[in-house]
């Protein structure tokens, strides 16, 4: 495994990187700790709507609708004209 990870002296790429793309992990990589902690932002880019808010429906026509009720965490019922649609926040 370590042989496949060692960079070649002319191409500066390892055989595994040339064949697979990303660098492979070996036992030595598992022993060393990653100094940068993995952070995950939750709901940072998700809009929060209340009942009665006006919002774009999101299709090509850019029609606006009124939020009727929240069904799940990111799903809403939207009234556009006289029709009721289910929409996801994204």
Image (spheres, rainbow, N blue to C red):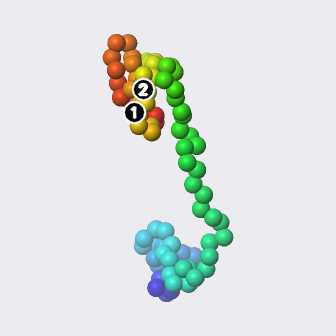
Estimate how packed mark 2 is, as few (under 14), some (14 to 19) or many (20 or more) residues with alpha carbons within 10 Å: some
Q: Residue 69 carries which label?
A: 2
Indicate whether 42 appears above or below 57: below
Given residues 77 and 11, the one toward you in this image is 77
Mark 2–mark 1 Cα distance, whole angstroms, equals 6 Å
Q: Tell me residue 84's x, y (percent).
A: 34, 20
Residue 62: tell me if it is visible: no
Locate residue 75, reporting x and y percent.
41, 34
* Residue at image location 42% in from the left, 22% down from the top: 68
Residue 40 visible in rendering: yes
The residue at which mark 1 appears reads as 71
The x, y position of residue 69, in whole percent, is: 42, 26
Question: Where does residue 35 sit, x and y in percent of width and height?
Answer: 66, 70
Compared across the picture, whether 14 is left or right of 35 comes to left
Which of these two is toward me, 64 or 16?
64
Residue 53, labelled with which disc? Answer: none
Element at label 1: loop
């Amino acid at each position: 495994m370590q042989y496949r990870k060692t960079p070649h002296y002319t191409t500066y790429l390892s055989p595994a990187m040339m064949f697979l793309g990303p660098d492979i992990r070996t036992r030595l990589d598992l022993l060393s700790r990653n100094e940068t902690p993995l952070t995950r932002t939750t709901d940072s880019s998700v809009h929060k709507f209340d009942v009665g808010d006006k919002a774009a429906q999101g299709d090509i026509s850019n029609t606006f609708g009124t939020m009727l009720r929240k069904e799940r965490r990111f799903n809403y019922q939207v009234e556009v004209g006289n029709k009721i649609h289910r929409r996801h926040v994204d």
